[in-house]
Image (cartoon, rainbow, N blue to C red):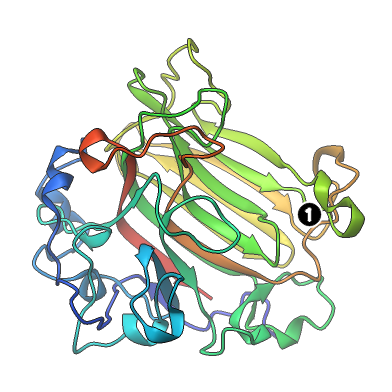
Amino acid sequence: MHTKNKIAAVVVSALVAGLAGCSTASSPDTASATPANQDPQLAAQYNLDVTKAPAENFDLSKFKLNLPMDDDKAERAGKVMEIYKSMLNNKEKPFSQAQWFYTDKTTGAMVFKAPNKAMTTPNSKNARSELRAMLSDDYSSPKNNFTVASTKDAEKYGAIGGHMSATLAVDWVSTSGNYKKGGAFATVIGQIHGSKNEPLKIVYRKLPGHEYGSVYWNYETNAKGDEYKFRHDISTDVFGQHGLRKGSAEPTDGIKLGDIFSYDVNVEGDIMHLTFTKNPGQPNQEVKKFDVNLAEGHLKGDKYDQGYANDWMYFKAGNYNQCNTGSAGCSNNGLEAGDYAQVSFYKLNLDQ
């Protein structure tokens, strides 16, 4: 029985990979300009070695990585850079990429950076530096993904449910963009992706001029067939408030750039349990929890939502920059102009 299927506890210590020409654990000069938390005690607190590549600090044995650049492998010519799971786990050549994925030289954090415009995956306009869970070595196999308990023939998948948790800080989000668009000034830091739609996207968004940003999560209604065009996100606030516009009041219950917080996503049976923690381990720690039945459908009365039973899913974590130069109206004037997003992970665990 796969119900919880704990195949291996991935306590993310990892990105080992050998891609020719890639640097090992060095961060770009532009990173020093970001408002990231630069307390050197964080390395000791989270047991991170600032001299090592992400692969040596974290276990990414069940992940592949996408980076916002053209792939240099012949079989992927013209596509976005993909670091295969086998590359990430090549202990001989610990993988890092000096601009988009590296170890912070002060804190030891695993840093994901993504510009406002770059090579993207086929069905997205947004650049990303992001991990994708891979439960199998065969990308097309059902064993590569998980499902919920109510799914017919659930045993053919790699797992029923799964548990991913992270401790992180958002260091920077783009300051350009259209205030009327939710993607402006925002990045997605954790996901569950289905075959087409996404039952979970965890978002951080901070408006220019605000000291505090907001953390919220989106459930994309799983509309299918002729009703696919009616799919949309249902947003739930955690810390701060989604949908803020120019002139909106400061979300003082939110989270500042560089502040450390955590999320925990645990799919058991049919239920997705979400736990968010602000100021983890501190006297002023604040915890918020939410539960969603992924199999049930019709969330909050949406008549087109069919739920995610009989669908396959996978976890993602990192930095999926929502500030694109198209629909979000963001500029692309380079890192020096602040046209990028940056996220630092101090912990990442996958139990599946």
Q: Circle 1 is placed at which residue position?
A: 222
Number of numbered discs: 1
Quarter where residue 295 is shown: bottom right
Residue drawn 86% across the image and 47% down it:
298
Quarter where residue 194 is shown: bottom right
Q: Residues within 10 Å of mark 1 (few under 14, many from 20)?
A: many
Amino acid type, mark 1: Asn
Residue drawn 81% across the image and 48% down it:
229
Is 117 on the left or on the right of 316, as rendered?
A: left
Residue drawn 84% across the image and 50% down it:
305
Look at the image and tell me in which quarter the N terminus lies: bottom right
Is 7 on the left or on the right of 224, as rendered?
A: left
Classify 238 as above or below 97.
Answer: above
Residue 343 horizontal/vertical position (percent): 32, 49
Quarter where residue 98 is shown: bottom left
Residue 256 horizontal/vertical position (percent): 33, 30
